Image (spheres, rainbow, N blue to C red):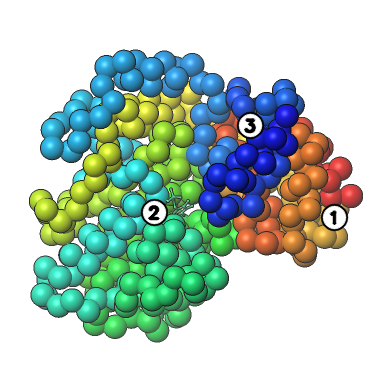
Amino acid sequence: MMKEYIEEAEKDLLHTYNRYQVVLDKGDGVYLYDIEGKKYLDFVSGIAVFALGYNNKAYNDALKGQIDKLIHTSNYYYNIPAIEAAKKLKKVSQMDRVFFTNSGAEAIEGAIKAARKYAFLKDGKTDHEIIAMNHSFHGRTMGALSVTGNPKYQEAFLPMIGNIKFADMNDFESVKAQVTDKTCAILFETVQGEGGIYPATEEFMKQVKALCEEKDILLILDEIQCGMGRTGYMFAWQKFGVKPDIMTCAKALGCGVPVGAFMMTEKVGQNSLTSGDHGTTYGGNPLATAAVNKVLDLFEENHIIENVKEVSGYLEKQLDALVESFDCIETRRGSGLMQGLVCKQPVGEVITKALDKGLILINAGTNIIRFVPPLIIQKKNVDEMIGILKECLS
Ligand SMILES: *Cc1c(COP(=O)(O)O)cnc(C)c1O
């Protein structure tokens, strides 16, 4: 049955993904089910999206209620879900101004535009530069791709947008070496996701922040994957108190309803994008922002961050034990419930084996097994995952 559906899909969908050979049907908690009824423990959550777990009744009911009321209005009118969601997001992000987008890449686009406009208003010039990091990932639109430090993703689509320079994460000297009078922003993921689950160090963040302050360069942090509680803090930068001028958020923000945001301090808000500069038809519509509202409420009510703090220590310990006992694993990297096992060989085969045994995992780069489970997981789910993974590794 699955085989026929997959054949149909491959006739009709543009082949931009090498998909796993499974047709998923429904979910419940931390488990997914395919159309033949096979159960899978999910340690991917739709790539760090479904933080609250599947089939969360309170979340589903909130969306159903909003569907019956109002789904879309455009941004020429106000709507209450967007007003409330912006207020809640400001509170948890410590930012002052919010723009809702439909995706992570669009949040990056907005952040880039805000930074360029901020610099333009300062000196009237149009040659500003942005420094991004090697091995970063910021999305697939042309602007987001331009700041993505992976030539493999860019090559066929050159030329990129201009004046982007690259430095190395956690190498402050390499960042400093790229700074010129034209630099308007420094952009990085607080924890690199696709590039290999690579957290920024406190020292690096503080050095970059000080440099930004000294030269009035904007610090843009991409919290699309590492944000929303995943590291045990609502946003990963909060662990070190290094506050960005602009930050991006998406993935778990709507827990599956497509929504992202870029946010900024009041200083940037008052001195960058203004009416006519930026827009979106869907962005922040009542359905998407009803999801954001409910997600943020449930994070509090269900003590999601506390759970991440508790379970992630256990996950780290169990993964470290695997590093000790399997020669094929080099090391573990990560923060909170965003972890990677760095292997000596490509991990595709292990991931396919795991899927076969009812465990959903994903890679980050070729050699890293990535763990980004729903944030509601319990220690017993970690044990179950480790048990299956061990079988696949031996
Ligand atoms: C996923 C991701 C993006 C892009 O988000 P999309 O919603 O896929 O456009 C950008 N930055 C980071 C860090 C991501 O993980």
Q: Amino acid at mark 2?
A: Ala
Q: Amino acid at mark 3?
A: Leu
Q: Secondary structure at mark 2?
A: helix
Residue at the outermost right position:
394
The Cα–Cα distance between marks 2 and 1, rounded to whole angstroms, is: 37 Å
Horizontal placement of 158 versus 75: left or right? Answer: right
Mark 2 CB within 8 Å of ligand 1: yes
Instruction: Say which mark, if any, is on residue 105.
Output: 2
- Circle 3 residues within 10 Å: few <14, some 14–19, many ≥20: some
The Cα–Cα distance between marks 1 and 3, rounded to whole angstroms, is: 31 Å
CB contact under 8 Å: marks 3 and 2: no
**Which residue: 44% across, 57% down?**
139
Instruction: Say which mark, if any, is on residue 326.
Output: 1
- Circle 2 residues within 10 Å: few <14, some 14–19, many ≥20: many
Q: Secondary structure at mark 1?
A: loop
Comparing labels 2 and 1, the label whose residue is closer to the camera? 2
Q: Nearer the viewer, residue 194 or 247?
A: 194
**From this viewpoint, is residue 306 visible?**
no
Q: Amino acid at mark 1?
A: Phe
- Circle 1 residues within 10 Å: few <14, some 14–19, many ≥20: few
Instruction: Indicate which disc, 1 or 3, sits on the residue closer to the N terminus.
Output: 3
Q: Nearer the viewer, residue 13 or 349?
A: 13
**Which residue: 84% across, 46% down?**
392
Name the residue tied to disc 3.
Answer: 24
Comparing labels 1 and 3, the label whose residue is closer to the camera? 3
**From this viewpoint, is residue 135 visible?**
yes
